[in-house]
Image: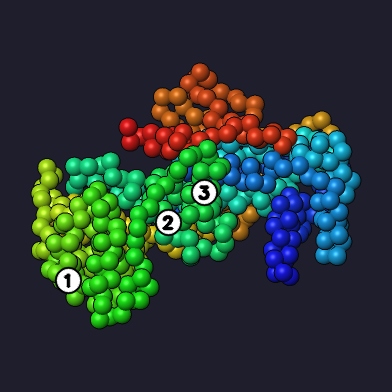
Amino acid sequence: MQNAQGFSHLASILSNPILNTDSYKASHYLQYPPGASAMFSYIESRGGRYERTLFFGLQMLLKEYLCRPVTAAMIDEARAFFSAHGEPFNEAGWRHVVEHCGGYLPVRIRAVPEGSVVPTHNVLVTVECDDPQVFWLASYLETMLLRVWYPITVATQSWHLRKLIRSALLKSSDDPSQLPFKLHDFGARGVSSAESAALGGAAHLVSFMGSDTVLGVLAANHYYNESMAAFSVPAAEHSTITAWGREREIDAYRNMIDRFGKPGAIVSVVSDSYDLFAALNAWGTELKQAVLDSGGTLVIRPDSGDPRTIVLHTLRSLEASFGSATNSKGRRVLNNVRVIQGDGVNPDSIAAILAAMDEAGFAADNIVFGMGGALLQQINRDTQRFAMKCSAIRIDDAWHDVAKDPVTDHGKRSMKGRLTLLRHRRTGEYRTVTLPVVWDDQTIAGDWDDALITVFDSGRLVADLSLAGIRSRAHADEV
């Protein structure tokens, strides 16, 4: 009972936006120049592994954390914490939010539409607060808002992997429509929290529609107005095979076919519990007729060994047993069976496996990838070097540019001024500019649109995007 109460209290704390910050933020309202009355901040990727980022995930954070009003009880809770924690607390500012703003934070957030693919070093999100009583909110929210780095980075990596797999399909397959199911999310157990599974799992689904991360699918459904964002199939794990004992391994495999091998169905069976090579032989001999009679597709999962080597061996063994057909691209497609590689899967191994398969004459149709830790956990804020910085402050009635430019690391130079992002109507080029926009001699104002939209204003979600629309935007170049 005590543990249940503890978790309930933790959930309450996490829903308090006053506490969803860094400790030192509590003292910052005392540190700004006299007369400060408004503040402007922005989020960008300052470069990293990928030169372009797919923007996604802000809507989840806004719906979950900023669309709920601050209450007097939240203020009391925060005051007690910061007083004991050694930080000052701006009770008057937060009381202003409750008493004069109805509990809703008087901030305006603009962002590029989710699903947009934007080159790094461009503004993606702006946060502005022009309420003199709580102008500092534009920076106070940094801790919570900058966590958008995580779904953006997951979505970005998956988008680039989709491009890689699509290229392999276009080269070797007659059926590019299978692309959305080629990279399956295996990452739920490898992340740091349930929230990470939800945020990261949903981000992967911008580019793919296969997932075993239930919380990610639920998040995509809930926050992005989708009925069912992803799908899965019956699949064996080692316990469901080894529970039969080594001497009855064949019975365990036969049970999978009997239970799930229906016409048109897909069943995935992990086959390396003891001896993958013996298992492949069994699938191609005493179990072969059961597979054929089922009318379904058997997917073999080799789960250990060098990924590139084992995938090629598995494909060749299955081809020897079940045969293959040559497609119009001159590549071979296995009959009745496929392979899913779920061990050691990362961007490098996917590229290596696809290249090796192509060299051996196998179509990309034959492989599905299951990606776990490398998909949802082996990334961090520096993968794409995300930062949120104040770029302008209003003192009395005049706006002043704000920027940092460390002599020890010019890569951390921040942008200055009140910013927006423009997009060229014809070329799709993006350009970050300061407000008001000043057009140079080579630029025709009518050729550019403001790429940022207002998504949140004073507690209200202004834009409520669908996953379907986000997917369409992210992959518009595939049409």
Residue located beneath label 2 in the image: 212
Q: Are marks 2 and 3 in contact (CB under 8 Å)?
A: no
- Mark 3 / mark 1, whichever is N-terminal: 3
Q: Is residue 148 left or right of residue 228?
A: right
- Please state the horizontal and vertical placement of residue 184, each as a whole percent of the image: 37, 54
Q: Residues within 10 Å of mark 1 (few under 14, many from 20)?
A: some
**Secondary structure at numbered mark 3:** helix
The residues tagged by marks 3 and 1 sit, at their Cα atoms, a distance apart of 38 Å
Residue located beneath label 3 in the image: 218
**Secondary structure at numbered mark 1:** helix
Instruction: Decide: is 455 above or below 440.
Output: below
Q: Is residue 243 left or right of residue 423?
A: left
Mark 1 or mark 2, which is nearer to you? 1
Location of the C terminus by quadrant is top left
Q: Residues within 10 Å of mark 2 (few under 14, many from 20)?
A: some
- Please state the horizontal and vertical placement of residue 441, each as a whole percent of the image: 51, 21
Residue at image point 18% right, 42% down: 174
- Mark 2 / mark 3, whichever is N-terminal: 2
- Mark 1 / mark 2, whichever is N-terminal: 2
Residue at image point 16% right, 57% down: 292
Residue at image point 47% right, 40% down: 227
Q: Quadrant of residue 267?
A: bottom left
Instruction: Decide: is 433 above or below 218.
Output: above
Amino acid beneath label 2:
Asp
Amino acid beneath label 1:
Ala
Q: Quadrant of residue 14?
A: bottom right
Location of the N terminus by quadrant is bottom right
Residue 282 disc label? 1
